[in-house]
Image: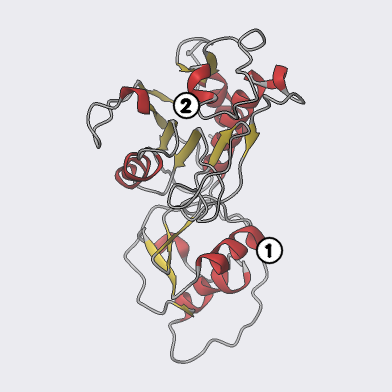
Amino acid sequence: MSIYTGSANTSFSSFATRTSASTVDSTDAVPERMPNCNYYRNLWWDKGELSSKAEWDKVTLPYKLAVGVTLNEYERRVEEFNVHGCWEWTNGDVIIYELPSEPHEICIGAITEELMDAVRPVKGTNAQIYSLGSTRKEADESFRPKKPLVVSPHTSDGLDCPWPNIVVEVAYTESVEHVLEKVKNYWLKPNRAHDAIVVKIDPVPAGDRPICMKVWHYCVSDRVTRNLFPARDKFDFGLHPPLTMQPGAFLIDIQLDCLYHGLKSNIQIPRNILPNPIVLDFFYVKRAIAEMFEDRE
């Protein structure tokens, strides 16, 4: 494994820095062979530090952070440094597609809360829905019930772990082209995830209120050809006040057969407990973002 010492790309929009392990640089001794900003950027991979000297606001994504990395080492650092949804592992390379930002985290949290609230009646039963851990191209959030173990090459982790049924991808600094490509050509390939929710928030300078959000919902039941997926739902709305949008205006419906696809044979879909479909109301996602930025006009 080695850190990547290539030159930085040209500038990208600013983002709100989130620390993971420490906000203090571990050393001030920068090797002469490496540009200062590259050295401090590599601290994110090496020690989990988002250094203020890294000049991440001048980076164009995607950005290669490390090369020659095993999948096990990648997953260990993702867990240790809590960088879920920011890095991706591809053929030994660790690539940054998303930079930590407040809008990104708030949006993920709000969508997760919507889904978990919808399935709360089955909490503690054998039909409970669980949030999942990491994979090499981990989603920002993913969910599934208890499913049978699977055998390679149809696993999500290279071992025997089944794929999630619902994945959520939120793109802020990540390009909409990349996030949609990842969903269609990775998550929704045959025998993988069943539904995907994709959100693109237009980036703004650090600390400013986000302006616009776009949302797509894909389901493999709508597959036209192997690689063609029409969006089951697609909408966009502004995030600035006044909040004229009302509850019920922008909904995503998740069918129970999709949510419980591939369920263990000894467990029944809880049709007498949960509504069909379960409904995610993006009014509450919009409100969460708006309220967290209400004093930053």
Query: Which residue in the rendered view is the most extreme toward the right?
Result: 124
At which x and y percent is residue 149? Answer: 57, 43
Query: Which residue in the rendered view is the most extreme toward the bottom?
Result: 32
160 or 242: nearer the viewer: 160
Please report the residue visible at 63 percent of the width from the left and 56 percent of the height from the top: 82
Residue 242 shows in the view: no
Find residue 21 and name its label: 1
At which x and y percent is residue 109? Answer: 61, 35
Q: Secondary structure at mark 2?
A: loop
Find residue 240 and name its label: 2
Please report the residue visible at 58 percent of the width from the left and 38 percent of the height from the top: 148
Q: Amino acid at mark 1?
A: Ala
Q: Amino acid at mark 2?
A: His
115 or 210: nearer the viewer: 115
The reply to whether callout 2 and callout 1 are in contact (CB within 8 Å) is no
155 or 141: nearer the viewer: 155
Q: CA distance from mark 2 to mark 1?
A: 33 Å
Find residue 206 and name its label: none
Q: Quadrant of residue 48?
A: bottom right
Q: How is the image coloured?
A: secondary structure
Please report the residue visible at 59 percent of the width from the left and 26 percent of the height from the top: 265
Give above or below for 230 relative to 130: above
Give above or below for 142 relative to 99: above
